[in-house]
Image (cartoon, rainbow, N blue to C red):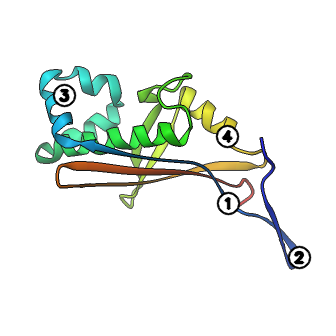
Amino acid sequence: MRAPMRWAHEERDCVLPMIIGLGTDLCDIARVTEMLKRFPGRFEARLFTDQEQARAERRKNARAARYAQMFAAKEACSKALGTGFRKGVFWRDIEVVHLPSGKPTMELYGGALRRMQDLTPSGMQAQVEVSLTDESGLANAVVMIFAVSASA
């Protein structure tokens, strides 16, 4: 584990945020639509938390697009962790959540959380940023994991 970069400014010693993981994924919404039809209930239960399913099911006309965005976000996060879905990282260990403002973010559990903690330098804490969009039948997600000063 590398030590965080330090920056001395006037009388303060600042720890600069650092990127510890970056991932992106593109998902075909038609493919997700097919999976939802082919494996009703099973696809959702295997990959998504109860909260994610509830959020996707609230908007019936955008149901597949919501699932595709979350699918892409989970893939992107697994790439940012540097593992993909192996080494103890499972689909339901990564959850897309929305802040009260509507901004998407991620909550990590189990093996995904342990991997993120392993990547995070001592004295720092991990912060996950996610961007989601869909257009022209595709859902896209970008996930960046930062290490920021634990005292900030």
* Label 4 – label 1 distance at C-alpha: 14 Å
Marked residue nearer the N-terminal end (2 or 3): 2
Tags 2 and 3 in contact by the CB under 8 Å rule? no
For badge 4, the amino acid type reads Leu
Q: Which residue in the protein does label 3 denote?
A: 35
Residue type beneath disc 2: Glu
| Residues packed near mark 4 inside 10 Å, few (<14), some (14 to 19) or many (20 plus) | many
Q: Position of residue 58 (x, y in %)?
A: 19, 43
- Please indicate whether residue 137 sits to the left or right of residue 2 in the image: left
The residue that label 1 is drawn on is 17
Picture coordinates of residue 126 (x, y %)?
A: 63, 48
| Alpha carbon separation for disc pair 4 and 3 | 33 Å
Q: Mark 3 is on which residue type? A: Met
SS label for mark 2: loop
The residue where tag 4 is placed is 119
Q: Are marks 2 and 1 in contact (CB under 8 Å)?
A: no
Quarter assignment of residue 43: top left
Q: Quadrant of the N terminus?
A: top right
Identify the disc placed on residue 11. Answer: 2
Q: Is residue 148 depicted above or below 109 in this figure? A: below
Q: Residue at x 72, y 53 (%)?
A: 150
Question: For the C terminus, which image quadrant?
Answer: bottom right
Q: Position of residue 120 (x, y in %)?
A: 69, 43
Element assignment for label 4: helix
